[in-house]
Image: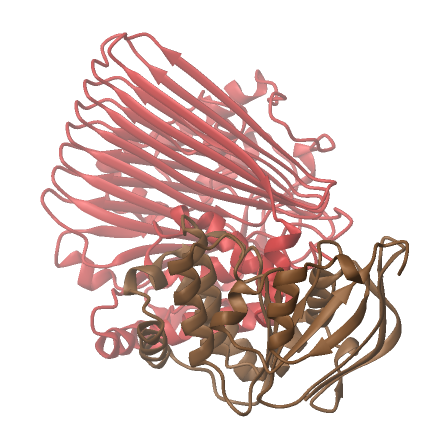
Amino acid sequence: MAATEQTVEQVRAVTEQKYKYGFTTEIESDLAPKGLNEDIVRFISAKKGEPEWLLEWRLQAYRHWLTMEEPTWAMVDFPKIDYQDSHYYAAPKAAKDKPKSLDEVDPELLATYEKLGIPLKEQAILAGVEGAGEMPAVAVDAVFDSVSVATTFKKKLEEKGIIFCSISEAIREHPELVRKYMGSVVPYSDNYYATLNCAVFTDGSFVYIPKGVRCPMELSTYFRINASNTGQFERTLIIADEGSYVSYLEGCTAPMRDENQLHAAVVELVAMDDATIKYSTVQNWYPGDENGKGGIYNFVTKRGACRGKNSKISWTQVETGSAITWKYPSCILQGDNSVGEFYSVAITNNYQQADTGTKMIHIGKNTRSTIVAKGISAGKAQSTYRGLVRILPKAEGARNYTQCDSLLIGDKCGAHTVPYIESRNRTARVEHEATTAKISEDQLFYCRARGLSEEDAVGLIVNGFCREVLKELPMEFAVEAQKLVAISLEGSVG
Amino acid sequence: MLEIKNLHATIDGKEILKGINLTINPGEVHAIMGPNGSGKSTLSYVLSGRDGYEVTEGSVTFQGKDLLAMEAEERAAEGVFLAFQYPVEIPGVSNTTFLKTALNAVRKHKGLPELDAMQFLKLIRAKAKALNMNDDMIKRAVNVGFSGGEKKRNDILQMAMLEPGFAILDETDSGLDIDALKLVADGVNSLRSPERSMLVITHYQRLLSYIVPDHVHVLAYGKIVRSGGKELALELEAKGYAEFGSPEAA
């Protein structure tokens, strides 16, 4: 049960402190000079030893980015970002030459991941699997600042033909796959932050599941921003070939810092005929302090393409961290009978702002989508659900069901629901339900009269409110998420 | 076990309890009857520690401890239980999760080890069976979609699980038809023991035919105006509360 125990232990440690991930690791970083220009783009590309076509693509994106304006339509408010004031590349020095095995990874880094509770050591995980019986194993790719430091379980996955590695390695080892799919879901000109990512992305994870293979374990990436004044721009690309299945988990943490740190990732998913991708995120970036100082700006573009018939992409996200969250994991339902799902819990406390939701684009016949979004606001936080359901003319028999529920704690926070629905096929059916509620005094007293502390009561009530979403998470994550939900609301009542 | 002395309490500055004196010994069941607005529910909330009520005078000791100095959850952990007039719904939280969290909080307070999932399930199944509740009811979300009778039985199940030393039953009969009332009363009676005291708050004598009290008190306009044995309930049923006057007289 080592893996489970580790998770439980981690959760216990989490409950002891409001944001326990607020430590920094003393590692010498290999930094690019501050600022952004074509030379920096070339510097990053050269550092990673990339092929010419990729550098060209980056430069194309950078030049396009210069012509773009920061989007202002979201319900978020923040001072203008000075893009010249960040480092666009930070690598732990010891990891400059990519380690060949875990033994070569800087022990300081391993210690950091251990603090985070990531079971990075394969032995520990293996031991955990043996003891755990049906408990699935988790293969982990860990990204520290800009560089992927270790990927576990690679050998075991290779036996099935599964590729799970850092995107840098994929560019070197599997350029044909990367070239074919990268930018095919989120084009380089897509939006301000995604375009910036295309120009300066540094690392991330790559997954390829071959035809007919069911990935035997959860694949997981942990992202951690450590160095100050660095932006983190990862790129994740997951391809599920015909008839394959994969479940992927993403976790994020960052140290406490006064200044805001920028995080602008791009995630692309591609599902071919009869393939299923389940993508789960527990986002716990540093949210800033009670007065709204510091915290991560999380401007992320996540999109999945259901290219093949009967394919399915399911997004589950638990968003508890970040000062600002701007994120709309989406599905392009191209293949006939393909299915898109979006399950979301977004919790905002103190001065946090979240504008999050999804886009479901129905192109193929009989495509179906389900959206369940739960927003919880406490303190002075603002939370917005923004969702687009678009049914194109050829999407005969398309269906969507959307449910948005908001829960308010206290009287200084806000919840907003902004659904956009466009249907251009008369056989399509689109349903939207929305509710807003407050945690009632009656509920709190009922729980307390049974022996629960006020904070435990809030945790329990909010977890109940989010249940439909949390039950979509893989088990190991669900426990952690439940605790996170409770912790992120500490001090929100009374 | 429980000693209430000269208890005065206000809500929003208005005095509702105007000097209550009551002693309840281990194993005794006391009934409090009275007209609407006499302060019956206020008394139950003041004893269980609900926010918003201010005690301006007097004391309450429970098993030798100052009850009024404790938060609601501490009182629950010490063994004070309130069966609600209107049990509250908690969507998405199963009865088992709710009760397991509550029971383990109480056990922790008492210095007992927490129950694991298997031990807990075994216990709740046994208790539910004794109360004629099926497995389905304990798996459903707390009180969500429950009938009036089911909600009350669910509260009694919670009481059976938490094993309080002192239970307050606030208008447990309200909204129940006679069959449901009997089921709930059977549940309560099965929990009577020489160590457990109860305070049954009700408008009507009806409930007291099934949960037979040792003592009956009449609460009118913030004071206990009369006390007697179980026959007092029958007398009140016949005569009504008129003889205890109006708010102005008190």
Depth check, front residue: A40 or B186: B186
Q: Position of residue A483 (x, y in %)?
A: 51, 62
- Give the residue at x 30% y 18%: A429
Q: Position of residue B220 (x, y in %)?
A: 78, 63
Q: Taking B153 as reference, is A125 above or below it?
A: below
Depth check, front residue: A83 or B173: B173
- Give the residue at x 44% y 41%: A344
Q: Image quadrant for the N terminus of chain B?
A: bottom right
Q: Residue B184 is drawn in which quadrant?
A: bottom left
Q: Which chain is brown?
A: B
Q: Position of residue A84 (x, y in %)?
A: 67, 34
Q: Residue B241 is drawn in which quadrant?
A: bottom right
Res. A20 visible in picture: no
Q: Which chain is red?
A: A
Q: Residue A336 is drawn in which quadrant?
A: top left
Colour scheme: by chain
- Give the residue at x 34% y 77%: A2
Q: Is residue B109 left or right of residue B11?
A: left
Q: Is residue B230 left or right of residue A242?
A: right
Q: Position of residue A291 (x, y in %)?
A: 78, 49
Q: Is residue B79 left or right of residue A435?
A: right
Depth check, front residue: A38 or A73: A73
Q: Taking B236 as reference, is A49 above or below it?
A: above
Res. B43 visible in picture: yes
Q: Taking A15 as reference, is A386 above or below it?
A: above
Q: Image quadrant for the C terminus of chain B?
A: bottom right
